[in-house]
Image (cartoon, rainbow, N blue to C red):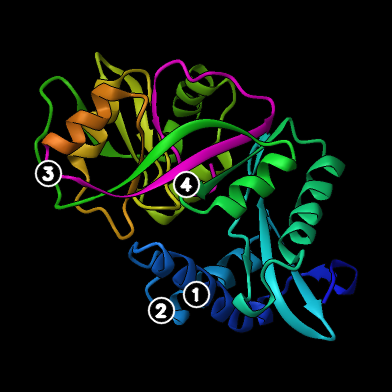
Amino acid sequence: MSASAVTIRNATPEDAAACGRICFDAFSAINTEHNFPPEIPTAEAAEGLLGMLFSHPRFHGVVAEVDGKIVGSNCLDERSAIAGVGPLTVDPTAQNKGVGRVLMDAAMDRAREADYAGVRLVQAAFHCRSLSLYAKLGFEVREPLAVMRGPAIARPLIGFEVRPATTADLDAANRVCQKVHGFDRGGELADAIGQGTAIVVERNGAITAYATSFGYFGHSVGESTADVVALISAATDFPPPGILVPMRNSQLFQWCLKSGLRMVQPMTLMTTGLYNEPVGAYLPSILY
């Protein structure tokens, strides 16, 4: 099989079963090969995830086919000025044959057509092939990440009030993200508020941090490391695989370790296009 034999089409919710099985098989195979725990527990969980993404109006999903058979899929998160790529998965029997490159080209073509200021992704740091593919596509390494997991910390910080986020908090929370990253992620935050998972930190009467949720598909932003510590301290649990902690923020990384969280996997944040060095603290999602 060559890359020229691969055809790309838009994904539909009906593709979730086939793509979910491929997603589970692909991630399980690479993680097992490198002695890391599976990131997706079952094929059913992968099917549910992709079904949600393929049906979301602000995600663009594509599938790759060879002779009418699905061999992989990819998604582009289109909820903010910066697009996020993933999950990119290829059937283990079709890997190393150019399918991943074709799926990435489809996502990047979509991003260029929509004129996104930048595109970001998070990849498993031990997966040299994917790191090399993204680098060849122009992505730059920006941040080493630690996937961290453990029991809830339940140790509130004095002076930091943590409460559920409401729609009335959107503007203030978006300003925090704008201050830290140079753009807001209001689409994701609005989704999280609607799902009842978002929380905010208030300090001295002002919102200084928020989290959409804790886990691979949640992100957090705070004006300071202490603000993000307050968010993590208030989390009731850290769903597997865990939270993504930027390791260059030594204060945050060391605090997580001292608080009982353990590192289970290294990952890498990569970007192309607009990138501002964060001014503050944050936890990325698996998309960026």
Task: State which tag comes first along the sequence, 2 or 4.
Answer: 2
Q: What residue did someone put label 2 on?
A: 42
Disc 2 residue type (three-letter):
Thr
Answer above or below: position of 84 versus 18: above
Question: Residue drawn 29% across and 58% down?
Answer: 239
Residue 113 at what x, y percent from top left?
A: 87, 43
Answer above or below: position of 286 versus 61: above
Locate residue 271: give its quadrant.
Answer: top right
Q: What residue did someone put label 1 on?
A: 24
Q: Identify the element where label 3 is drawn.
A: loop
For the residue carrying disc 1, how many other residues have a C-alpha within 10 Å: few (<14), some (14-19), or many (20+)? many
Q: What residue did someone put label 3 on?
A: 260
Residue 208 at what x, y percent from top left?
A: 34, 21
Magenta-colored span: 259-288
Disc 3 residue type (three-letter):
Gly
Task: State which tag comes first along the sequence, 2 or 1.
Answer: 1
Question: Residue drawn 18% across and 52% down?
Answer: 150
Pointers 3 and 4 in contact (C-beta within 8 Å)? no
Disc 4 residue type (three-letter):
Ala
Task: State which tag comes first along the sequence, 2 or 3.
Answer: 2
Residue 125 bears which disc, if any?
Answer: 4
